[in-house]
Image (spheres, rainbow, N blue to C red):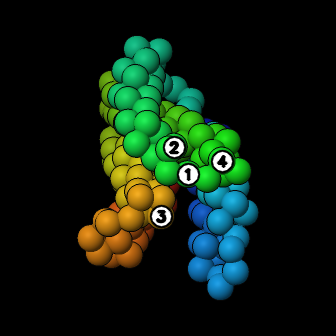
Amino acid sequence: RRSSDLRWQRAVLVGLVLSLVGDVCLMLPMDLFVPGLVAFLLAHLGYIVAFAPGSTWGARAIAFAVLAGVAGVNLVGLLPRIEPALKGAVIAYVVVLASMAAFALARAWTPALMREHPGGTRLAALGGVAFVASDSLLAWDKFAGGIPMPALLVLATYWFAQWCIARSVEAG
């Protein structure tokens, strides 16, 4: 295996383990929202280590513009509903989440990477976008309420995201 493949595998493994820590924090009966948020933020940093190398600047610029738009819409709608003590943590998390998804999309939009790793690149991009969808649904339900079937929608998109990201290692 090439060192880039090994780096990808290790970084995705770190992301998956930290996501598990975040899951445990959010499922416990006490309020561990902020520690869970930090665990997921660190998980996304692991995914960024996996996804960032190799994409072109043009692909990154487009992907970051798209994800900045999605993040901006979410923040404009949600920030007035979030208690002041959580706003900084939520903004930091959104920036890291959007960056992770942008790097994943940029890989898929870089022709050389798509030729070299078509399956893994596509799965990573799908996983990044699904993670944004999952966390957006979760945030809107937590802070604004009214999402129909929130547990089903959030968990379905979350597990699909994690499955895609985990599979990207093998399919690479």
Amino acid type, mark 1? Ile
The secondary element bearing badge 4 is classed as: helix
Residue farthest along the top direction in this orientation:
58
Are discs 2 and 1 less than 8 Å apart at CB? yes
Q: Please name the residue shown 51% across and 43% down the image.
A: 79
User: Which percent across, then down, holds residue 94?
Assistant: 54, 42
Q: Which residue is mark 1?
A: 82
Mark pair 4, 3: CA separation: 15 Å
Q: Please name the residue shown 35% across and 71% down the image.
A: 150
Query: Splitting the image into 4 quarters, where does residue 30 fall?
Result: bottom right
| Viewer-nearest residue: 5 or 90 | 90
Amino acid type, mark 2? Leu
Q: Name the mark on residue 7.
A: none
Q: Which residue is mark 3?
A: 142
Mark pair 3, 2: CA separation: 12 Å
Q: Name the mark on residue 84.
A: 4
Query: Splitting the image into 4 quarters, where does residue 28 fall?
Result: bottom right
Mark pair 2, 4: CA separation: 9 Å
